[in-house]
């Protein structure tokens, strides 16, 4: 593939190429996303008339995500809370938040991989 490496429009060419890659990847995933939604009985369209009732039903979870940044029953959060507790820092993140640094066992448990 020939690619312009000098002169005007080099950045624009690279940006256009990156944008095209993203668009192609999104287009290729549409079928997979639809299949995933159908397999989980997720709606493919939004019924805006029933949306307020659905939001009210999810109020506790939405509040938790807004306040804590994560749902309260998220398994990763639950596991991290167990690790914080085992490190002697109590049942929540309040003591850890006041510390200047995290203990190594908490730090290692919070890293992906």
Image (cartoon, rainbow, N blue to C red):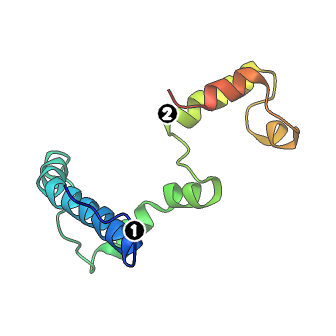
Compared with 35, 112 (above or below) is above
At x 59%, y 31%, the residue is: 111
Tell me which label, 2 or 1, sits earlier in the chain: 1
Q: Secondary structure at mark 1?
A: loop
Provide the secondary structure element on which disc 2 rests: helix
The x, y position of residue 105, in whole percent, is 71, 20
Q: Nearer the viewer, mark 2 or mark 1?
A: 1
Q: Residue at x 56, y 44 (%)?
A: 72
In percent of width and height, residue 20 lies at 24, 65
Q: Quadrant of residue 55?
A: bottom left
* Residue at numbered disc 2: 75
- Please say if 33 is above or below 7: above
Question: Which quadrant holds residue 85?
Answer: top right
Depth check: 57 or 22 in front?
22
The answer to whether residue 17 is left or right of residue 106 is left
The location of residue 53, given as percent across then percent down, is: 36, 71
Q: Is residue 49 rendered to the left or right of residue 61?
A: left
Question: Is 19 in front, or is 25?
Answer: 19
Residue 109 disc label = none
Residue 5 in the figure: left or right of residue 88: left
State yes or no: discs 2 and 1 in contact (Cβ < 8 Å). Answer: no
Q: Residue at x 80, y 36 (%)?
A: 96
Q: CA distance from mark 2 to mark 1?
A: 50 Å
**Numbered circles on residues, count:** 2
Residue 47 pos. (x, y %): 22, 75
Viewer-nearest residue: 60 or 76: 76
Residue holding disc 1: 6
From what the image shows, is residue 82 above or below residue 39?
Answer: above
Circle 2 packing at 10 Å, graded few (<14), some (14-19), many (20+), is few
């Amino acid at each position: 593939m020939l690619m312009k490496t000098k002169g005007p429009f080099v950045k624009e060419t690279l940006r256009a190429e990156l944008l095209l890659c993203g668009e192609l990847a999104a287009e290729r995933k549409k079928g997979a996303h639809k299949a995933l939604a159908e397999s989980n009985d997720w709606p493919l369209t939004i019924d805006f008339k029933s949306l307020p009732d659905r939001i009210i039903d999810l109020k506790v979870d939405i509040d938790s995500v807004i306040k804590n940044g994560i749902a309260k029953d998220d398994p990763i959060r639950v596991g991290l809370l167990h690790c914080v507790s085992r490190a002697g820092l109590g049942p929540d993140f309040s003591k850890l938040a006041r510390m200047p640094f995290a203990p190594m066992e908490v730090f290692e448990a919070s890293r992906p991989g």
